Image (tube, grey):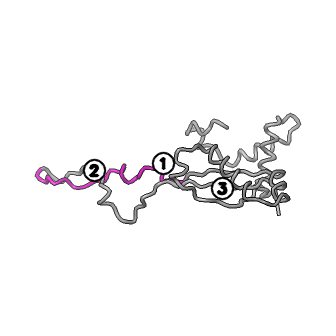
């Protein structure tokens, strides 16, 4: 199952029945520790025992453009720990754990404008041999003003791994 995403013909056959299969097989005496771990995770999801979302911040693209997710994650974690001056809260956070997720949101082409890669069909100017269609890209000055100029945003989302008041 872990490699199903690499094979579309297999991936399209995956349904929720896999969840029931994991639950059933994990209840058997011969279940592996990995299967029991997967079942425990599914149980946490069912009872909504999820990591608590704390906050998110849109990252400045110029500042973090050449940084890896690991570098960004470490910087955000350190920044949060440096802002907490109450030792009691800091100890709770260390005991509980914190997860920083770096999320990129874009139009599927990273920082590129997807409209620049779309071919639009326009009628040819030569109508002598009938109406013909030709595919062309549209220049940026021909595109609507509603098209954004930034095509990718990066967010740092912070979660705590246990219930903290």
x and y percent of residue 34 in the render? 79, 37
98, above or below 4, in the image: below
Could you say which quadrant of the image residue 24 lies in? top right
Give the Cα distance between marks 3 and 1: 19 Å
Q: Earlier in the sequence, mark 3 or mark 2?
A: 2
Q: Earlier in the sequence, mark 1 or mark 2?
A: 1
What residue do we see at 58% from left, 36% from top?
6
Farthest left residue in view? 128
Determine whether the residue tagged by mark 1 lies in a helix, strand or loop: loop
- Which residue is the site of mark 3? 157
Give the Cα distance between marks 3 and 2: 40 Å
- Which residue is the site of mark 1? 110
- Which residue is the site of mark 2? 136
x and y percent of residue 91 in the render? 84, 54
**How busy is the neighbourhood of tag 1: few (under 14 within 10 Å), some, or many (20 plus)?**
few
Relative side of 93 to 73, left or right: right
Relative side of 124 to 88, left or right: left
Front position in the image: 86 or 131: 86
x and y percent of residue 23 in the render? 80, 45
Mark 3 or mark 2, whichever is nearer to me = 3
What residue do we see at 76% from left, 55% from top?
160
Which quadrant holds the N terminus?
top right
**How busy is the neighbourhood of tag 3: few (under 14 within 10 Å), some, or many (20 plus)?**
some
x and y percent of residue 41 in the render? 78, 47
Q: Earlier in the sequence, mark 3 or mark 1?
A: 1
Say whether residue 114 is magenta. yes
Q: In the rendered structure, are the residues bearing label 3 and label 2 in contact, judged by CB atoms less than 8 Å apart?
A: no
């Amino acid at each position: 199952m872990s490699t199903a995403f690499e094979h579309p013909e297999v991936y399209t056959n995956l349904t929720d029945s896999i969840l029931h299969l994991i639950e059933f097989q994990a209840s058997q005496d011969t279940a592996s520790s990995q299967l029991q771990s997967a079942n425990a995770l599914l149980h946490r999801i069912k009872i909504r025992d999820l990591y608590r979302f704390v906050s998110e911040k849109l990252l400045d693209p110029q500042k973090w453009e050449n940084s890896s997710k690991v570098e960004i994650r470490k910087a955000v974690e350190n920044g949060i720990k440096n802002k907490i001056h109450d030792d009691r809260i800091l100890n709770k956070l260390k005991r509980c754990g914190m997860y920083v997720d770096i999320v990129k949101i874009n139009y599927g082409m990273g920082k590129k404008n997807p409209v620049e890669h779309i071919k639009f069909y326009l009628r040819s100017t030569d109508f002598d041999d009938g109406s013909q269609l030709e595919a062309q890209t549209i220049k940026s000055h021909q595109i609507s003003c509603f098209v954004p100029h930034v095509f990718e945003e990066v967010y740092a989302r912070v979660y705590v791994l246990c219930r903290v008041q």
